[in-house]
Amino acid sequence: MNGGPSGFNNASVTKTFVISCLVFTIFFGIKGRSNNFGFSHQDFFQKPRLWKLIVSVFAFSSTPELMFGVYLLYYFRVFERQIGSNKYSVFILFSVIVSLLLELLAVSLLKDPSVNLLTFGPYGLIFASFVPFYFDIPVSTMFRVFGVRFSDKSFIYLAGLQLLFSSWKRSILPGICGILAGSLYRLNVFRIRRIKFPDFVTSFFSRLSWPSTGSPPAPSTRNVVGSVPSYPGHQVENSLWWFQRTYPSLIASAIEPPEDSIAMLVSMGFDRNSARQALVQARNDVNVATNILLEAQSH
């Protein structure tokens, strides 16, 4: 289970976030200042340090946390591909802010010296992502190890548990707050799932990103999600039926969807047959096919 094709294709926001985490962690680790970025409620009330909170969102406190955290962030790029870079940016901002506020509230109420200084890093975003991962990503394979059943999703859960218990109480609390933030997003509190940033925000991340590595995206004449007209589900089926009747030979050759494009849409949680039909309708344009499938789900 890899979250779709390798690389950061159609995931420019995730790419920028991951690279920021690497840069901040390495820079402050080399400077020996990483231990100064754990925060407590004093950072909000007695000595407000907004810059410290911003840095603590990106910088991990140790190399093992960096490895597992970046691995999970990289895998969860599937959600940016599924909902688009614009809405995923909203999800990131909502998860980070809400989880920080919940952590502040928890520390103030618990008054436990052992959690008075919380660990830092993008725990809010990572553990908020486990909510859609649990509900929206299907299990594709099952296997047994010493008689115990596992799924392909088990590796992601194990990496999450490793990160959750990396600093014991100091990391468990941010993880729980991240899960609560993801749950509030899924419940559409304040209609958060309808909010979108201006288009220039996500286009900025696309221009900011370094050249992608991994398999190239499918050929496309329109490569920005949301910039093409959408089609209801019944239009997909009717148009496909007409095209099959009119040009049956072209269906078998010219626009037969490549397997990697189908796999990419299936990894987002779409049915395989629906993914294939959408790709045929979109003439193998993965972005257009994603719009078609999302539009069909909303009807």
Image: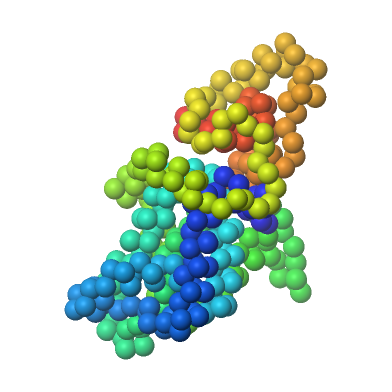
In-front residue for pair 40/176: 40
Who's the residue at 28% across and 68% down the image? 50
Q: Is residue 117 above or below residue 129?
A: below
In-front residue for pair 66/83: 66
From the top left corner, tell me how far across and down residue 9 is, in percent: 60, 47
Residue 122 is at least partly visible in this image: yes
From the top left corner, tell me how far across and down residue 168 is, in percent: 47, 83
Q: Is residue 187 left or right of residue 248?
A: left
Q: Tell me the quarter of the picture where residue 281 sits.
A: top right
Q: Tell me the quarter of the picture where residue 173 sits.
A: bottom left
Q: Is residue 44 above or below residue 262?
A: below
Who's the residue at 50% across and 27% down the image? 228
Q: Is residue 223 above or below residue 117?
A: above
Residue 14 is at least partly visible in this image: no
Who's the residue at 52% across and 61% down the image? 18
Of all residues, the one furthest to the left in this rendering is: 46
